[in-house]
Image (tube, rainbow, N blue to C red):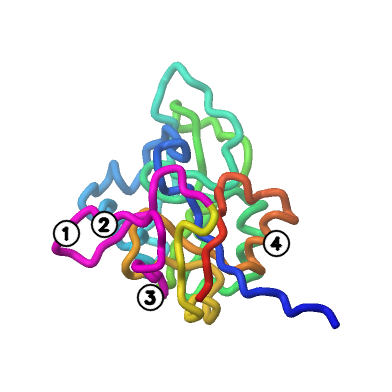
Amino acid sequence: MARAKKPMVWISDAMVGTASIKGFEADVVLRDMERAVDAMRRNRLGEPQPEACFPKEMFAKYKDKKEKKQPDLFMAGGFWTVSFYCAAVLRQFNLGKGNLYPVKLLQHDRTTPVEGAYFCLNFGAQKTAVLTDQSSRIDKPYEKHDIWEPPMAMQDKDIAVSSNALEGPDIWMDTRLRRAFFVSDSLAQALRAAKVSRPFKLRKCIVI
């Protein structure tokens, strides 16, 4: 008799460090910085937001650099963005109240398109599942606040989550953890099958 597959949850290391940040400026930032910064903050918390909160166009920041085709997941102008192929995978899964909003990436001249099609990713789902006392390398930057962060150079099984993480949306933010998001095992496997998982930097969680 075959063993039952062990439940699995994955955490992304993409938000730790600066490797995922690309040199673009968002039209919403240039138009209304305060509102745009609030939209970025809400997205990091996993709050659903309408399309109007996200950029329609983003422009290459550096005049002397021609931007090439971008990765399948990256941050541009302060907004998390995915490729057409990554978006096609995400649409097959439960995003909670999150969404994918089309955005044009343009060169510094604000006319010439960057190769590829792209979408801003609104993280519109939250769960409370991280087990801080059983996460071996989790960080607590502020002693008096129940706010936690994943470690630099995160490894498999650094973060533990309760079985609550197995229910509901396939991509989400945890209410107690900053600078990271989680994906279900089914989504992780689909991203891998489509060969778009590399920039997600997925690490296995311990499910308790």
The quarter of the picture where residue 135 lies is: bottom left
Q: Which residues are magenta?
A: 129-155
Q: CA distance from mark 3 to mark 1?
A: 20 Å
Q: CA distance from mark 2 to mark 4?
A: 32 Å
Q: Residue furthest right?
A: 1
Q: Which of the two discs, 3 and 4, sits closer to the camera? A: 3
Q: Which mark is residue 159?
A: none
CB-based contact (under 8 Å), mark 3 and mark 1:
no
Task: Tell me which numbered mark, 3 or 4, is placed earlier along the sequence.
Answer: 3
On the image, numbered disc 1 is attached to which residue?
143
On the image, numbered disc 2 is attached to which residue?
140
Q: CA distance from mark 1 to mark 4?
A: 38 Å
Q: Badge 4: how crowded within 10 Å, few (<14), some, or many (20+)?
A: some
Q: Residue at x 41, y 58 (%)?
A: 136
On the image, numbered disc 3 is attached to which residue?
128
- On the picture, is 39 further left or further right than 121? left
Q: Which of the two discs, 3 and 1, sits closer to the camera? A: 1
Q: Position of residue 100 (x, y in %)?
A: 52, 61
> Does the magenta run of residues contain 140?
yes
The quarter of the picture where residue 153 lies is: top left
Q: Is residue 118 visible?
A: no
- Label 1, secondary structure: give it: loop
The amino acid type found where label 1 is placed reads Glu
Q: Which of the two discs, 3 and 2, sits closer to the camera? A: 2
The amino acid type found where label 3 is placed reads Thr
Task: Tell me which numbered mark, 2 or 4, is placed earlier along the sequence.
Answer: 2
- Label 3, secondary structure: give it: loop
Task: Tell me which numbered mark, 3 or 2, is placed earlier along the sequence.
Answer: 3
Q: Which mark is residue 190?
A: 4
The amino acid type found where label 2 is placed reads Lys
